[in-house]
Image (cartoon, rainbow, N blue to C red):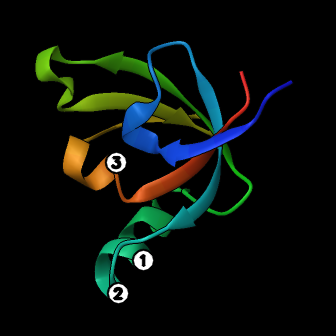
């Protein structure tokens, strides 16, 4: 299965990825980690609004929305 790295914002609804890196500074990165976005965590894109912002993502048992500019700073490896 082909694996490719990209920003979380590039995942389309129904696609899955594994978190590899958060490129946000200090407090923003800590907040993402508090939400459960940790290295090696699998997540999926559930929905993208028109113009791709915001988008809904599932991680663990939670669903949350991120703006495109924030999701672009989260590096994932697409797996499906």
Disc marking residue 68: none
SS class, disc 3:
helix
Q: Position of residue 43 (x, y in %)?
A: 60, 36
Q: Nearer the viewer, mark 3 or mark 1?
A: 3
Q: Residue at x 63, y 27 (%)?
A: 16
- Which residue is most to the left? 51
SS class, disc 2:
helix
Q: Nearer the viewer, mark 2 or mark 3?
A: 3
Is residue 67 visible in the rendered image? The answer is no
Mark 3 nearby-residue class (10 Å; few <14, some 14–19, many ≥20): many
Residue situated in front as seen by the camera: 79 or 38: 79
Q: Residue at x 40, y 74 (%)?
A: 29
Residue behind mark 2: 26
Distance of label 3 from label 1 (alpha carbons): 14 Å
Residue behind mark 3: 71
Q: Is residue 68 above or below residue 34?
A: above
- Label 3 close to label 1 by CB (< 8 Å): no
Quarter of the rendering containing residue 68 = top left
Residue behind mark 1: 30
């Amino acid at each position: 299965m082909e694996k490719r790295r990209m920003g979380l914002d590039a995942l389309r609804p129904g696609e899955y990825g594994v978190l590899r890196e958060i490129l946000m500074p200090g407090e923003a990165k800590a907040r993402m980690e508090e939400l459960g976005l940790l290295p090696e965590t699998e997540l999926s894109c559930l929905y993208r609004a028109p113009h791709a912002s915001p988008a809904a993502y599932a991680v663990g048992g939670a669903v949350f929305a991120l703006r495109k500019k924030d999701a672009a700073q989260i590096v994932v490896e697409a797996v499906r």
